Amino acid sequence: MRKRENKQNHRPILRRFTTWLHGAGAKCALIYAVGTLVLLVLFAAACAPQRYSLSVGAISHQTITATKDVEDTVTTESRRREASVRVEATYHFQEGVTESVLSDLDETFRQLRIVQQYGLTLRVQDGETATETNLAATFSAEEIDYALQQVEAVSLTRYQATVLMRASTENFDTMAVTVRLAVESALNTTIREGQVSQSIAAIKQIAGYRVETSLMQNIVPVVLNHCIRPNMVIDQELTAQAQENAAAQVEPVVYLQGQNIIREGERVQANQLAMLEALGLLDTASYDYDIYLGALLLIAISMSVLILMLVILAPEVLRDVRRSSVIMVVLVLCEGLCVIAVKLLDVYLAPVVMAAMLLTTLLSARVGISATFTMALIAAGLSAGSSNAYSAEMVHLILTGVVSGIVAVQYLKDKPQRVRMVIAGVIVAVVNMVVILAMSLMTSNNISGMMNNAMWSMAGGILSGLISVGFQPVFEAAFNLATPAKLLELANPNQPLLRRLLLEAPGTYHHAIVVANLAEAAAEKIGANPLLARTGAYFHDIGKLKRPLYFKENQMGDNPHDRTDPYVSAAIVTAHTRDGLALAQKYHLPPEIQTIIMEHHGDTPVMYFYHKALQMADGKPVDIADFRYDGQRPTTKESAIVMLADTIEAAVRSIPDPTPKAIEQFIERLVRGKLEDGQLSNSPLTLRDIDAICEAFCKVLNGVFHERIEYPTVNVPARPLVKAEKEAEKETKQMQAEIKAEKQAEAEKTPEVKAEAKAEKQAEAEKTPEVKPEAKAEKPDVPEKPAAPVEESEENT
């Protein structure tokens, strides 16, 4: 029983998971996961150092630079050893050494005297004089052996024993006294440890003037080497400390980041190989697990920031497959360009702000702000990873990326046209320069390096704007995005669908124009997308192109619905949303506009044909569902606005007296009907938004149906004539009067007078040609033909 209950409890969870797995949420999650993996691969590849196969003495085939600051430990240690060696030893006086040395010296001379006296005794026995040295005296081996046995203090050779046995007592005493005095003098002036040989040499030099030569050469050195010891010994502790201090004062030899360690064609030295090993640039180094782990953590943090920002600012994007794809593709593209800039040129040239610019113009300012923080973190990580060290560049890139990104988004959010993207790049360049200079002044006194970084950073800002302009139409076409540029292009009257609408369904076209004006005003009022609302309104009724004469606005008198069953009529009318969607898909209109086309009627019923069906049903039940649109209710602000604008524009024409008050009440009644029918229940509109929309509608419609004053029929006085016109008018009237008088006189003549005039004319005709010109010249100057036009002109006047 309990197992069955557990199964029943788990079924809703499994059902929800299965639903999510087949929905847009799972697809979006997969998009973000794949995008994150691509970002990680790019990041790790950029941070992993290049490795080289080198050994001491090998020839380098390329120049290798330090990827970060590295110490030349071999050279540094060599210099420190030299500094330690140069340190003079610290000595201290050793008590009792002088007395011990003199005592040893006296004992040694005592034993040597025994040998000398033994030799003298042997020579005296042979008849020699006791006071003289006999260098030619000879002794037997036994005698020499006996003599050597008498000396324990020093080790004498047989020859040295022979020399001593040949010496006279005077010479021996002179040697003993002289050497003792020299040794005592040397001890009084101190004999330092390590300088015993120098002291012995000095003593020999002093004693050599008085000591017999053979003794000086053979006996004195043996005695001194045995007895002399230093009375000034080295203080090992103080000396070692002094050497350590000297070594510590030696500055380490450091190769700065970017400095050449080995040039192409050079033979590799031990110190260079040690530096390469310390940098991890040898192929014998272990895998960079720490670098890859750090890259994983940084990308995870960056993507977490992006997701959290989108959850707060634009949660609807996380459920939209198309827009999620755009975000990840832009981030990957931007990271790739940053990697190229960091690796090949300069870290400050990285187009960090490009992602913010593109996503602001392609999607929205909220998405652009979210991408700003993400790309700032990734770019800073790239700068550190490429040098394998933390540096001021990380802080600079984070600050410039965030500050410049916010400035660019703020500048582009209201009017994201392409030309403004270039201007935004220039603004970002200035902001980058200011931030870099500010940070550099706080941390460095290197003016040339500071200006160099600022110039590269400015170039990076301008590059971000130019690249964004180039890629924007690519993303528009690839993802069919409703960007401002795309919407402006679609709103052109020469767009093929709008052109067809104007020619084939002019009533629908003009209806769409008014709906667009209403929708744009309402969208601006509540902070929606006015350009999307206007463009969507232009296309919301394109489905009527299939049967334009079945819609009232396109009918010129005959109404085919009068001869059509109401069910068929309702089917024809409600089909225009499906037909519009098919046309929108055929002409590749953005999905946002397709949504408006399908949602602008929701699932409202066509009440006219429903009532007509009721009248024809003779009391039989009529299902209102047969007369409803099969679209879905509006899910966006723009769709809801177009629905309300379409309803109000079509119905407001029926108001007999469209006064502002009547229009306002009519709009409120229609909107209330939509609310009560639940048509706005799926839209994000609030009651405050609906009030603002109604207010915007009233303002536009009051401008359309405003009253005009009646223009009275009045005689407008002629303008005053100038002097020349008055004179011309006077001459014309005078001429007209003369012509009129002549005609009147002609009409008053009697028949007899007319006959005489006729006879005179005939006589004139018979005159010779010479006389004709004279007669012709006697005629009046006023021509006869112009008389008729003058009369007509007078009548017209």
Image: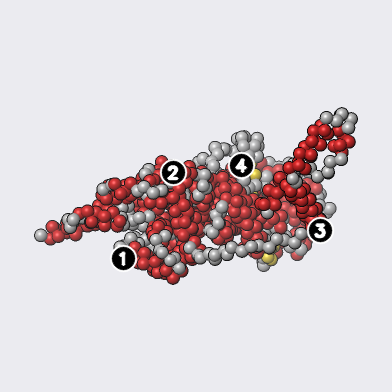
Instruction: Using the numbered discs, state the Cα–Cα distance from disc 1 to disc 4 in whole angstroms.
Output: 76 Å
Instruction: Using the numbered discs, state the Cα–Cα distance from disc 3 to disc 2 in whole angstroms.
Output: 59 Å
Q: Amino acid at mark 1?
A: Glu
Q: Amino acid at mark 3?
A: Lys
Extreme residue in the front direction: 752
Relative placement, left or right, of 314 versus 575 is: right
Q: Quadrant of the C terminus?
A: bottom right
Instruction: Using the numbered discs, state the Cα–Cα distance from disc 1 to disc 2 in whole angstroms.
Output: 36 Å
Instruction: Using the numbered discs, state the Cα–Cα distance from disc 4 to disc 3 in whole angstroms.
Output: 99 Å
| SS category of the residue bearing label 2 | helix
Q: Earlier in the sequence, mark 4 or mark 3?
A: 4
Q: Earlier in the sequence, mark 1 or mark 2?
A: 2
Q: Position of residue 549 (x, y in %)?
A: 38, 46
Q: Nearer the viewer, mark 3 or mark 1?
A: 3
Q: Earlier in the sequence, mark 1 or mark 4?
A: 4
Residue at the image point whose x is 76% and y is 63% from the top: 189
In the drawing, what numbered circle is on residue 676? 1
